[in-house]
Amino acid sequence: MTVAMSNAFTLDEGVSRLGVALSDGGIETLARYLALLAKWNRTYNLTAIREPEKMITHHALDSLAVVPHLPVRAGLRVLDVGSGGGLPGIPIAIARPDAKVVLVDANAKKATFLAQAAIEVPVGNVEAVGGRVEDYRPFAPFDVVVSRAFADLATFAKLARPHLAEGGVMLAMKGALPSDEIAALPADVEVVSTTRLEVPRLEGERHLVVMRCR
């Protein structure tokens, strides 16, 4: 719990500044997740970021920045493609306990961590799937497919679209606005919006690209 105890105020302040309302115990759950990520990271190298404060800003707060842009409806189904250490999927699941969040990663060690995090943190509305997203066969499609620094937009859209429900959206979290990638999208993928995300204490640009199939 080192990450949680030494940085709880920063985490609480950052979440407040984002304007994301977590349910009772949400901050503590998020802190437990960051502590577990830091613990596993020492052995399995799940993320290049190791400093506790940067894990808060670059992982937790950066992931939570997408929450206000999610559809507001009960039973929301979210697929996090290339989830890695659970980002942005686990923070989304903590912020939206009404949603079902599935985390997919092809790396076996990362998939093992995701499954353990869902149990140990715990995050009851999370399911971890090990394997390539191309091979994943869910029982139902998703309202939202999200990725964070996963691939170029065209590749992400190609992999995401088979899993989209009718009217579903694809959310790509990026750094600088990827104008070249947007221009390279196929004609049957429409960019709904591009939004600059303001993440407390995180330097550099962050953008959200929202897409849907025509």
Image (cartoon, rainbow, N blue to C red):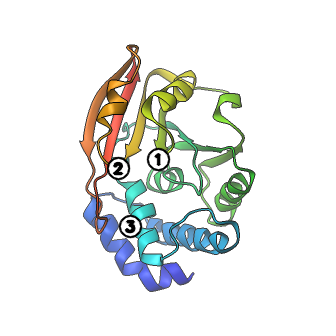
Q: Nearer the viewer, residue 125 or 51?
A: 51
Q: Mark 1 vs mark 3: which is more N-terminal? A: 3
- 131 to 119, vertically: above or below: above
Closer to the eye: label 2 or 3: 2
Label 2 packing within 10 angstroms: few (<14), some (14-19), many (20+): some
Q: Which residue is mark 2?
A: 175
Disc 1 versus disc 3: nearer the observer: 1
Whether 182 is drawn above or below 56: the answer is above
Give the answer, above or below, for where 183 lies relative to 15: above
* Mark 2 to mark 1 CA distance (whole Å): 8 Å
Say whether residue 75 is visible.
no
Whole-angstrom CA distance, mark 2 to mark 3, is 14 Å
- Tell me, yes or no, if residue 26 can be seen here: yes
Of callouts 2 and 3, the N-terminal one? 3
The residue lying at 49 percent from left, 79 percent from top is 4
Q: Secondary structure at mark 1?
A: loop
Q: Which three-letter amino acid code belongs to the residue tagged 3?
A: Thr
Amino acid at dot 2: Gly
Q: Answer above or below: position of 138 versus 89.
A: above
The amino acid type, in three-letter code, at marker 1 is Ala
Kindly identify which residue carries mark 1. 149
* Spatial CA span between label 1 and label 3: 16 Å
Mark 3 closeness class: few <14, some 14–19, many ≥20 residues within 10 Å: many
